[in-house]
Amino acid sequence: MSLMGLDIGTTGCKAVVFDLEGREIAKAYREYPLRHPFVGAAELDPSEVWDKVCGAIREVNALVPSDPVRALAVSSQGETCVPVDSQGRPLHNFVVTFDNRTIEQQDWWASTVGANKLFSITGMPLHSMYTINKVMWFKRHRPGIYRATWKFLCCEDYAIFRLTGIPALDYSMAARTMAFDVDKRRWSDKILDLADIDKKKLSQVFPSGAAVGLVAPEAAEDLGFSASVTVVTGGHDQPCGALGAGVISSESAMNATGTSDVICPALAEPIISEAMLSSNFCCYPHVFNDYYCSIGFNLTGGLLLRWYRDTFCAEEVSIARRTGRDPYDVIFESIGPETRDLFFLPHFVGSGTPTLDSKSRGAILGLTLDVGKPELARAVVDSINYEMRLNIEAMENAGIAIQKLHVIGGGAKSPKWLQMKADVFGKPVCVLEHTEAAAFGAALLAGQAIGVYPSLQEAVSYLIKIRMNFEPDFRNIDRHRERYLRYKRIYPLLKKFNHDLAS
């Protein structure tokens, strides 16, 4: 018997199978392209996405014939949605998180309801990305599609519907729509009434880890499932990753270093406060029991490092290709040991939290003629870390105490980066035995739903192992303290200039 975690992201999906001891026994990955039908639009073709998901499922099922999957759950990107008719046929592409056609809806909420009232109900700081704005856009600009729509589905409930015929969404994903009451844990009649959206067009909501139904016989045969498979509600990819990283108490937080750099702490109680809102931190249900979580993020974590690689590091990429190594390992070997007053403002696609400023821009400050690639590489990584320290500091000011970080994603592969994180954050950093935390979190929810694990807490304590700890070096903490104070001045100094450029 085994468990499957499906991780459906913005540009690709994974199907990962784990045995009951938490060991990864099969994995498949597929990519799909983003589509941009007009300026500012970002969409996914639902048939392409589902075809890739099915391909990944078939591949892993073929690899585990003697250890068949008995339950699965979905971890998915947030906010993305697709309208489907009564037969489940898509009426439009998925509109993804960072599609910006919904600025007018954001402005409407700001003038009609206000950010404070919205946050008090939904736990979401006002932004254009949320699903409710996309549904409102369809009603205003594609009224024919709106009238023909049976359900507006996010990635999670779309996948569950395709597998079972039942449209079901967990609380954490429902919260990312900005139409969910995070206190009462149900669709908010007030928000839906203000938006003039019919609640019947949304999926039924369940806690994470709820058994929805079995994979339909025809789908099971097509996908290579060898026995009845229970489909379980999973959740938003960040809290799923936090669960899969063992972040189930208020002392620790997940740090996912991938395309973006994300910090996701677990909260025993919801924190809906002015300090949270002023730093643009959300508060919504965790996938773990009755806990809540929040997110602090830098949109260009690994993305900025990839830009640096592609722009400056042809030699390092060539060395990596010749020696069969990862280019980032070669780059990190070249990073100078000494800090200096050279900074990046990593707002190359706007800023994340705590400023959440889409008009901010990237910058390099402190350049002199003696600066080379080692110094630039050091400044890139230090500045990414300083941006996340801003988030940790703002979270702590809002009452979220973070004592330790569990790092997942690509950044977890570099011991040098992990030590630099510990030194900048002034907190212990650890990495885990397994790497697919979001898929593993979904698999844990699936196992708990069918009774394989008595409780999620027991499963986490038994199955999640720390591979390596990195303690802060206090000599380096002192060096970083002064540089961090300089770094904090950069965004306020450049804000007006960057806004002028953006205009």
Image (tube, rainbow, N blue to C red):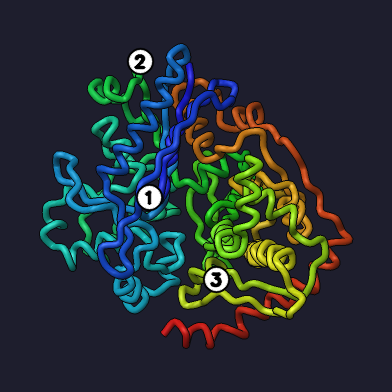
Quarter occupied by residue 347: bottom right
Left or right: residue 68 compared with residue 418: left
Asked whether the beta carbons under mark 3 and mark 1 sit within 8 Å of each other, the answer is no
Label placed on residue 347: 3
Label placed on residue 226: 2
Q: Position of residue 46 (x, y in %)?
A: 27, 46
Q: CA distance from mark 2 to mark 1?
A: 31 Å
Q: Amino acid at mark 3?
A: His
- Dot 2: few (<14), some (14–19), or many (≥20) neighbours within 10 Å? some
Q: Earlier in the sequence, mark 2 or mark 1?
A: 1
Q: Nearer the viewer, mark 3 or mark 1?
A: 3
Label placed on residue 340: none
Residue with the mark numbered 1: 174
Asked whether the beta carbons under mark 2 and mark 3 sit within 8 Å of each other, the answer is no
| Looking at the image, residue 179 lies above or below residue 108 | above
Q: Amino acid at mark 2?
A: Ser
Q: Secondary structure at mark 1?
A: helix
| Outermost right residue | 475
| Looking at the image, residue 401 lies above or below residue 89 | below
Kindly identify the residue that appears in the image at 42 percent across and 29 percent down. Answer: 72
Q: Secondary structure at mark 3?
A: loop
Q: Secondary structure at mark 2?
A: loop
Q: Amino acid at mark 1?
A: Ala
